[in-house]
Amino acid sequence: MLVPAARTCFLMALFALGAVGGWAQNPTLGKSQPLTTAAWLSLAGDARIADHWGTHAEAQWRQAKGVGAAHQNLLRLGLTYHATAALQLTAGYGLLLTAAQRDAPGTVALPEHRLYEQLVINDSQNRLQLQHRYRLEQRWVQLAEQTAPTYLNRIRYQLRLTYPLSGPTLKPGGAYAVAADELFLGFGRHVEHGIFDQNRAYAALGYQVLKSLAVEVGYQNQLAPPNSAATFGSTHSVQLGLQFSPDFRPAALLTTTQEAGAKEASTRKN
C-alpha cells in the first residue's frame, strides 16, 4: 500500500489546516459572500500510447448565474509519464477564456494562459480508492482593466475518494460514488488578499460504461474570496463529466481483440 492509513489521515488533517490557514489570512473572512449557481460540462481523455507514456486532453464548459457570474471555456493538454502503476507525472498547457456575460453586446472573453506540472499518486484501502493530485501552475491572467497580463503562481492539492457500489472492485457495468476536495493556494509577489485562492468540494455518482469510458453526475461547492481570479463568493454547481481512457499500446490492443474474438465465438456457440 503506497500510503498507509495513518499517513492518509495525517495528510487529510494537514489539508484541512491549510484551508483554515488560507481563510484566516483573508481580510474578507466573516463577511457574507454572494451565492452563484452554475452548470459545468467536462470532457476528459487520458490515452496510453506506450508503457511509460500517455497524453491528456480536457475541455470544460462552465456557465454561471448570479452576482459576478461568468461564462468560461477551458482547454487543457498534457504529456504524462507513468513511472509506476501508482505514480504519474504530467506537464502541459491550459487556456481559460472568461466572459462576464456570455450574450452581452461587446463582451470580450479574457484569456488566461497556463503552464502546469502535476504529480498523481494512486492508492487503495480495501474497496476505497484514493488519489492524491498535486499541481503547480504558472498563470498569465488577462484582466479587463489592464493591457498586459498579470503573472501568478498557484499550487493545488486534490484528494479524491472513489468507492465501488456494485462490487469489491470497479468494473464495466458498475456504479461508484466519489467524494473529493481541492485546495488552491497562490504564492509570489502578485498575490493579494492572502494566499487562499479557492476551495472546491465535490460529490458525485458515476457509472463505468466500459473499461475505458466512465460518466459522472455530481455537485460542487466552490468557495472563492472577492478579488480572486475565480468566480466571486460561493458557487453551487451541477456537473456532468465524461472520462475516456483508451489504451493504444499494442499489447492492450491485442488483448482487446482477443476478448472480442472470444465473445463472438461464445455468442456463436450459444
Image (cartoon, rainbow, N blue to C red):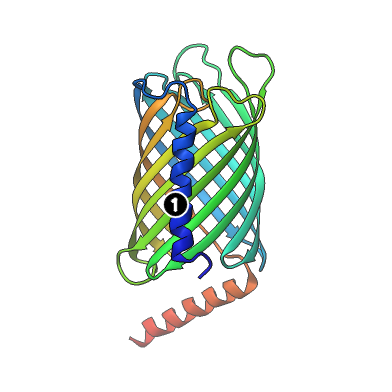
266 with respect to 252 (left or right): left
Residue 222: x and y in percent read 41, 34
Q: Which residue is mark 1?
A: 12
Residue 71 seen: yes
Residue 220: x and y in percent read 37, 40
Residue type at tag 1: Met
Residue 93: x and y in percent read 65, 41
Instruction: Please tell me which residue is depicted at 66% across the width and 23% down the height of the picture.
Output: 150
177 with respect to 247 (left or right): left
Q: SS of the residue at dot 1?
A: helix
Closer-to-camera residue (150/23) = 23
> Is disc 1 surrounded by few (<14), some (14 to 19) or many (20+) residues within 10 Å?
some
Residue 144 location, quadrant: top right
Residue 211 seen: no
50 with respect to 213 (left or right): right
Rendered view: 11 above or below 151: below
Instruction: Please tell me which residue is depicted at 61% across the width and 59% down the height of the picture.
Output: 88
Instruction: Please tell me which residue is depicted at 50% across the width and 20% down the height of the picture.
Output: 227
